[in-house]
Structure formats: structure tokens, C-alpha cells
Image (cartoon, grey):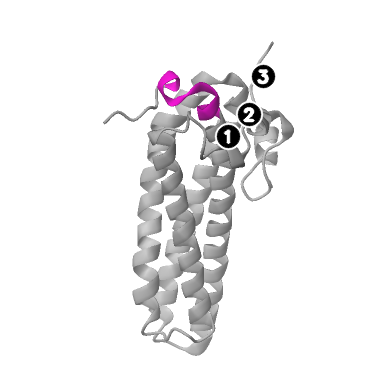
């Protein structure tokens, strides 16, 4: 069996903004270990459970941020109330994503790549996702700051900044959810197949 290096056009085809899941060749393990089997599986150890809990937190934060944006645009939250609801949640999301991605890039991805060469292309794609998400994070932070500055300004400027923020935040959160789903579909089945101890990612208290 030969393992081919991914080519740039192949990685581009699976870019975060374009894809809607994994192609068949990267779904071999998820076909054997579908999501409905994960929680009761003996190989779902402390590392995987903690990692999945972080992903659940990111999804919850994304939903909360979207709800705050909607409430502001619909007039439920006033310009005076909006920053108090948005800023701490958005700051926490951005800071925690940065830490989470560093751990994955520097520790987990190299371990998983070494464990299963057939999934190398998938981890290359996921690492590329991190770069795309961080670019979206920068754009969202920039747009959020512009919107916060515009809250006490002209209505037209506020509308424009609000639209810019909605677009930036929407791209970030949509890409993030896609990434979390695909990352789990690649990594959790590998953990269930091999076990955390054998992979070298087990948490020891």
C-alpha cells in the first residue's frame, strides 16, 4: 500500500469555506464508529471526554454570541447593553480557541498523524482550518471593535459597522462549527479504534 502526499489542489478543494464534510476515503473509521456509539464506548477515555467538552463549550459560546447579535439587531438589547453581553463572551471564545488550537497543532495532530498515515490528509486539512479560523478571528475582532466604537456615532455608520460585524462573525462561527464536527469525525473514531493509551494521549491523574 502506498500513501500519497496531498497535493495543494486537493487541500484547496477541502478548504473550510467549501467543504460539507469528509470525502469517502477519510470516512473509513467514522463508518465503523458512528457518533451514536461514542459515549458508551470503552475506549472513550478522559482525554477524549475533556476534548469533546471543550468543543461543546465552543458550540455553546457560538450560540450565545449569535443570540446576542440577534437581540441587538432586533432592538431587544440597547446600544448601552450590547457590549456588556457581547464583549466577555467573544473575548473568551477567541482566547480559548487560540489555546485550544496550539495544543492540537503542537501535540495531538503530530501524534494522530504518526498513528494513521491514511488520515494524514485530513490532519493537513484541519491544520489549514486553524489558519483560516484565526484569520476569521482577527477579522471578527476588528469588526467588533469598529462596531463598539460606532455605537455612539451616526446611525449610518452604526448600520455599516453592524453589517460588517455580522458578516465577519457569521463566517467565523459557521466555519468553526464545520471544523469542530469534522475534527471530531476524524479523531474520535481513531481513538475508539486504537485506545488513548496506545496512541499516547491518555490523561493520567
Q: Which span is picked out in magenta?
A: 190-199
SS type, badge 2: helix
- Distance in Å between CA atoms under marks 2 and 3: 19 Å
Q: In terms of secondary structure, what is the magenta stretch mainly?
A: helix
- Distance in Å between CA atoms under marks 3 and 1: 18 Å
> Which residue is most to the left?
205
Image height check: is 69 above or below 114?
below
User: What residue is rendered at 73% in x and 33% in y?
Assistant: 24
Image quadrant of residue 22?
top right
Is 180 situated left or right of 99 in this image? right
Q: Which residue is denoted by mark 3 in the rendering?
A: 4
Is 193 included in the stretch rendered in magenta? yes
Name the N-terminal-most of marks 1 and 2.
Answer: 2
Q: Position of residue 33 (x, y in %)?
A: 61, 32
Q: Which residue is denoted by mark 1 in the rendering?
A: 186
User: What residue is rendered at 44% in x and 75% in y?
Assistant: 147
User: What residue is rendered at 65% in x and 16% in y?
Assistant: 3
Q: Position of residue 53 (x, y in %)?
A: 42, 47
The image's mark for residue 29 is 2
Q: Position of residue 78 (x, y in %)?
A: 42, 86
Q: Position of residue 109 (x, y in %)?
A: 47, 30
Front tag of 2 and 3: 2
Is 77 situated left or right of 178 in this image? left
Front tag of 1 and 2: 2
The image's mark for residue 39 is none
- The C terminus - image quarter: top left
Name the N-terminal-most of marks 2 and 3.
Answer: 3
> Which residue is most to the right?
24
Q: Nearer the viewer, residue 8 or 102?
A: 102
Amino acid at each position: 500500500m502506498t500513501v500519497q502526499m496531498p497535493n495543494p489542489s486537493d487541500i484547496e478543494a477541502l478548504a473550510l469555506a467549501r467543504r460539507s464534510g469528509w470525502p469517502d476515503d477519510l470516512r473509513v473509521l467514522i463508518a465503523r464508529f458512528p457518533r451514536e456509539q461514542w459515549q458508551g464506548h470503552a475506549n472513550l477515555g478522559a482525554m477524549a471526554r475533556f476534548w469533546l467538552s471543550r468543543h461543546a463549550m465552543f458550540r455553546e459560546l457560538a450560540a450565545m454570541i449569535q443570540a446576542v447579535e440577534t437581540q441587538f439587531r432586533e432592538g431587544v438589547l440597547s446600544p448601552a447593553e450590547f457590549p456588556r453581553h457581547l464583549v466577555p463572551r467573544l473575548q473568551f471564545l477567541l482566547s480559548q480557541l487560540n489555546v485550544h488550537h496550539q495544543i492540537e497543532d503542537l501535540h495531538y495532530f503530530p501524534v494522530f498523524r504518526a498513528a494513521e498515515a491514511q488520515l494524514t490528509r485530513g490532519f493537513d486539512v484541519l491544520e489549514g482550518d486553524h489558519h483560516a479560523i484565526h484569520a476569521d478571528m482577527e477579522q471578527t475582532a476588528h469588526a467588533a471593535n469598529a462596531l463598539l466604537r460606532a455605537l455612539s456615532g451616526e446611525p449610518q455608520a452604526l448600520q455599516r459597522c453592524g453589517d460588517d460585524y455580522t458578516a465577519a462573525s457569521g463566517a467565523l462561527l459557521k466555519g468553526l462549527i464545520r471544523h469542530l464536527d469534522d475534527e471530531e469525525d476524524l479523531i474520535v473514531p481513531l481513538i475508539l479504534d486504537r485506545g488513548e493509551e496506545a496512541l499516547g494521549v491518555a490523561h493520567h491523574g
